[in-house]
Image (tube, rainbow, N blue to C red):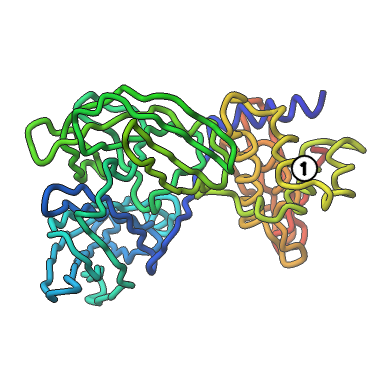
Amino acid sequence: MKKILFFFIIALSFYCYAQPSRQGLNQMRGIFFDTIVIPSADKADCYITYQTTYNRLVFVKDKDVFTSRFSLTIEAVDSLTGKVYREIVDNEHSVANFEETNSESKYILGVIKLSLPMGSYKVLPVIYDFNTNSEHVLSQFDLRLNFQDTKWVLSPIVLKDDSPKEIAGKVLAGFDGNVPFSDEEFNMIIPVADTNVSVVYVELKNNDSLIYKDSLRNSVISSLSFSRDKGEIIASFLSHQGSPTRNFILPKFNQKLQEGTLQITVSRPGKEKAVFKRAVVWFNKPRSLNNLEYAVKILRNIEEGETESRKNDKTGEAMDYNGLWKYWKKFDPTPSTAYNELMAEFYSRVDYAISNFSLISNPNGADTDRGRVYIKFGKPKSVERIYQDARDVREVWVYDSPERRFVFVDKTGLGNFILSGKL
């Protein structure tokens, strides 16, 4: 009963206080790049998306805000002729307080379009920071555009959330074409060059297990265009511009996907199957989940006494990652999807406790009284620190859902706050 009540408490506070973090792939000194190629008869529109988190940028105080200013130059050099194609975009972004400038979960993103003849290119990104008057040359990457290699179906594009009919959706920038393991719902756009094609057959395999296999007819004939709007990269359906494709739409395809490999197979009668390999990546995965033995042991914060998690403390090495997921599945608020919001919230709290409540005598902040309370109940509604004297400091945490009040006392002057009373 205590266990069920505790998970109910986590669920209540989860919806009020869940705070995402952000990690990524293909990092180039803090900037993440993706490339979307839309070919036509003799050239291709190359959309290079970029994303960087606030903590990777230099912010300078400007009146009442902190502002970052930088430009990004993309140079594409033709490997055969040496001709240079160049585009530059300026970025300026302001935040309200200094704490935001160190955020790992907030980011700036954008897109640069290059129209390139078919061929092979070396692509070089260069950042110029106006706040420090410094230039940073990033790692170059290869871009190969060959009309003869163009398949009847283009690379699938992953978009997030639902949008108006004229908008395909918001592009996932900086994910290297991979699919986030997330509680968000994503749509897949599969562009087909021949607009006369009315049906395709799609198969999804996740970690070699068949997740989806069906015909797909839902489609829109249009050109695809990508632009930045209100801090997001938007994919738009344009009816009267560029080279149209028939864009098949597979909605909410990610709900059953687990972390690991993803193979997308698209076929139609009389044509060779097109196979695209991706990964399903938990980009904001709590760090505490990367240590399986610790992830099992920390479950002592859930139950009291010699219960299931206590037993797992002794046999943690025998529980594999799948076993841990099975343990948490019975508490999953959305059991029809692969992502377990409650599990993610719990280990995110563990990460926060480790980082924010560590002591000289106990560097594992999750194993302190404040850490244990935070893991169980989440972020308090209010925190008040009361100084009686140098060796009697009290910290009062107040919660309103459910109503609780915790008093921590530090009698050492070293931040060693001990809970007054039982948890």
Residue closest to the far right: 306
Callout 1: helix, strand or loop?
helix
The reply to whether residue 80 is in sight is: yes
Q: Is residue 379 visible?
A: no
Q: What residue is pinned by disc 1?
A: 299
At x 71%, y 38%, the residue is: 406
Quadrant position of the C terminus in the picture: top right
Q: Quick check: 12 left or right of 24?
A: right
Quadrant of the rendered image containing residue 211: top right
Q: Is residue 123 left or right of residue 52?
A: left
* Picture residue at 24% right of the left edge, 70% below the top: 122
Q: Is residue 145 above or below residue 383?
A: below
Question: Residue at image x 65%, y 54%?
Answer: 290
Residue 123: percent from left, percent from top: 24, 68
Label total for image: 1
Circle 1: residue type: Leu
Q: Residue at x 43, y 39 (%)?
A: 265
45 vs 401, nearest the viewer: 45
Q: Percent x, y for residue 171?
A: 31, 42
